[in-house]
Image (cartoon, helix red, strand yellow):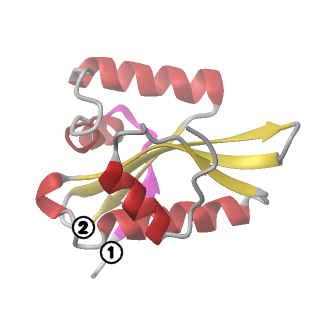
Amino acid sequence: MRVTEIKFAMTDGEIRACHPVMAELRTHLSDEEFVDQVKRQITDSGFQLVYLLDDGVKAVGGIRIAEWLASGKCLEIEDLVSTAAERSKGYGGALFDWIVDYGRQQDCKQIKLVSHVMRFAAHRFYLSKRMNLEAH
């Protein structure tokens, strides 16, 4: 798979370009609500929106770095989604691997994510990426 670019969405236009992909996971947010909420989360909680481009946005992730008393500095994956039309082409895996590498570069001790208990396909993906199920 050829990946042309993975980058952080910083401008309104970049954030808006991620919405159609993220809307497949977060269906309740309109385009404007998505842009406003992402900008607010970037300012208020250190949220970062990262996306993979290959002739358009193919995968999007929402991450933040936080420090926990129990485990130290961690990168948390809040959302990770690839467009349904492009699933099983490696885009989600490539973005996941990039996020993990970014966490290492930021000296994070752990990569954490939260996935709804009923998202079985997502769990298979995360288990294939050597993530552990630690809580329900």
Where the N terminus falls, by quadrant? bottom left
Is residue 93 something one can see in this rendering? yes
**Residue beneath disc 2:** 54
- Residue 24 image position (x, y, % from top left): 21, 39
Residue at point 59% right, 24% down? 43
Which of 110/122 is in front? 122
Q: Viewed as shown, does residue 38 lie left or right of 109?
A: left
Q: Which residues are magenta?
A: 5-12
Numbered tag placed on residue 3 in the rendering: 1
Q: Give SS at disc 2.
A: loop
Q: Residue at x 35, y 37 (%)?
A: 15
Neighbour tally class for label 2: few under 14, some 14-19, many 20 plus, Cα within 10 Å: some
Q: Is residue 8 magenta?
A: yes
Considering only vertical position in the picture, is 27 above or below 61?
above
Callout 2 amino acid: Asp
- Count the labels in the image: 2
- Do the residues under discs 1 and 2 have CB atoms within 8 angstroms? yes
Percent of width and height locating residue 50: 45, 50
Which quarter of the image is occupied by the C terminus? top right
